[in-house]
Image (tube, grey):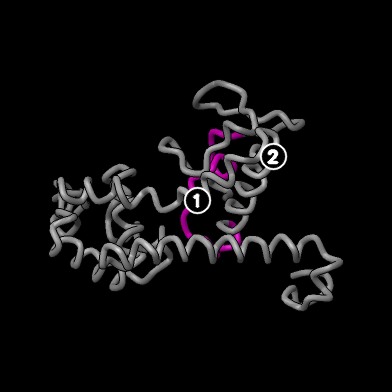
Amino acid sequence: MSKKGNIFNLENQQHDVTAKIVVSLERISEAFRTLLWRHSNETGLSPIQIQLLIFIQNHPENLCKISYLSKEFNLAKPTISDAVKTLIKKEFLIKIGDSTDNRSFGLKLTKNGVKLVEQLAQFTSPLESIIGQLTSNQQEDLLEGLSNIVYKLKREGIILNQRTCFGCRYYSNQDNSQYCHLLKAPLKKSDIRLDCQEFEEKESA
């Protein structure tokens, strides 16, 4: 919490950088929701249904199961199940059987689902355009700061899933020298990943 208490108190905000950053993140979150709702109104899908389609299209099958999706989006399993059932009914998703567990199944986009996601994934374009106007150094500093926030939110149990370098067992940072032991290569600020396919969580994370 801000040292001066309520961060939404305007007087507190003026003299507290932490408060200003938190409020800025809240405004960006609002912009994200607004952009998502625009596409929701255009497609007749709910925001979470749109997010599920985009996630499933871009992640491996082992992450595209109800139990994992529930943690990924921090929503109850019945809520995710209802959204998935609707997407299957609309023929945007199909179930993929699990050879090791008859009770479990993965999810995959249909051809219609893939075509729809190509359109839906553009909802972040206004944000991308604005961030693209920052200098390379500004973008790198922003990425490093946000990656640290995501990692620490996971450690606090606020975010249930994260796949950023800072929480990965292959990552190390000694004397401000970042390194990936899987790639066997040093990492620049711009190399830090927020969503890595090779991510394996640290035991202490």
Q: Which residue is mark 2?
A: 138
Q: Identity of the amino acid at label 2?
A: Gln
**Residue 138 relative to residue 57: left or right:** right
* Secondary structure of the residue carrying numbered label 1: helix
Residue at the spot 27% in from the left edge and 62% down from the top edge: 43
Q: Quadrant of the N terminus?
A: bottom right
Q: Residue at x 46, y 39 (%)?
A: 196
10 or 156, nearer to the observer: 10
Which secondary structure dominates the residues rendered in magenta? Answer: loop
Q: Position of residue 8 (x, y in %)?
A: 72, 76
Residue range of the region highlighted in magenta in the rendering: 155-171
Residue under the image location 21 percent in, 52 percent down = 107
> Which residue reaches farthest right?
15
Q: Is residue 62 above or below residue 170?
A: below
Q: Position of residue 205 (x, y in %)?
A: 57, 50
Asked whether, in this view, residue 170 is left or right of residue 83, the answer is: right
Relative depth, front residue between 151 and 20: 20
Q: Position of residue 152 (x, y in %)?
A: 62, 55
Q: Is residue 198 left or right of residue 54?
A: right
Q: Which residue is mark 1?
A: 126
Picture coordinates of residue 87 (x, y %)?
Answer: 20, 62
In this rendering, the answer to whether 147 lies above or below 160 is above
For the point 57% across and 36% down, the residue is 192
Give the mark toward the camera: 2 or 1: 1
Are the residues flagged by discs 2 and 1 in contact, CB closer than 8 Å? Answer: no
Mark before the other along the chain sequence, 2 or 1: 1
Q: Secondary structure at mark 2?
A: helix
Q: Residues within 10 Å of mark 1 (few under 14, many from 20)?
A: few
